[in-house]
Amino acid sequence: MTEHLIDILDGSQRVLHTYPVTLPGPEGAATDADYGAKALEAAAHGQLVPDIELRDLSASTHISRSGRMEPYGDTISSNSETKLGLEQLVREHAYVLWEQAGRPERQADDHWNRALDQHLRERAYVLWRQEGCPEGRADEHWRRVREFEAY
């Protein structure tokens, strides 16, 4: 698996966010379009822009500016919708659930799984809303979110 940096651009071609994208499979199997599609999906999941503006977004391979990756004027966390970002969000939510349950011992996995499930369901709901609330397609959105999380 190879990581590519993909810039998400608005309709004026201004970079809104740079995502690190990794796709499964052998080296060279995925195309630039595959990486771009994954980054656009991350932008939708992360609600990078209002739903109505999603269709105006485009993706482009990040052009190195030398040194550490620093997106242009980006105010979004560099972990947004990445594995590390997801783990951090789930960890924080699991901690809150644990505290709300009275800090019970030996239930960390239960709280982690509940927090992850809640987060993924919220993301599936966002996708469903962004696609105009199509009737009878909840399972499709749930599957897409689970696949996204698996990468």
Image (cartoon, rainbow, N blue to C red):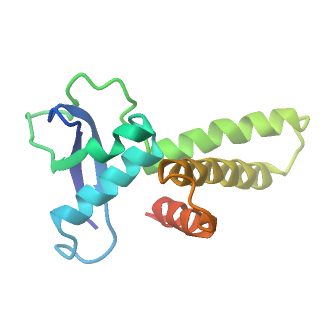
Quick check: 97 left or right of 125?
Answer: right
Q: How many marks?
A: 0
Is 123 placed above or below 144 here?
A: above
- Pinpoint residue 54: horizontal percent, then vertical percent: 35, 44
Is 149 placed above or below 19 here?
A: below
- Pinpoint residue 74: horizontal percent, then vertical percent: 29, 26
Q: Quadrant of residue 103?
A: top right
What residue is rendered at 20% in x and 63% in y? Answer: 33
What residue is rendered at 16% in x and 62% in y? Answer: 32
Is 30 placed above or below 43 here?
A: below
- Pinpoint residue 46: horizontal percent, then vertical percent: 45, 41
In depth, the one of 36 and 94 nearer the eye is 36
Give the position of the N terminus as an image quadrant: bottom left
Q: Quadrant of residue 92?
A: top right
Quick check: 113 left or right of 50?
Answer: right
Give the position of the C terminus as an image quadrant: bottom left
What residue is rendered at 40% in x and 31% in y? Answer: 77
What residue is rendered at 25% in x and 77% in y? Answer: 26
In depth, the one of 126 and 134 nearer the eye is 134
- Pinpoint residue 90: horizontal percent, then vertical percent: 62, 44
Q: Say whether residue 26 is visible.
A: yes
Q: Quadrant of residue 50?
A: top left
Quick check: 59 left or right of 117?
Answer: left
Quick check: 99 left or right of 27?
Answer: right
Q: Say whether residue 79 is visible.
A: no
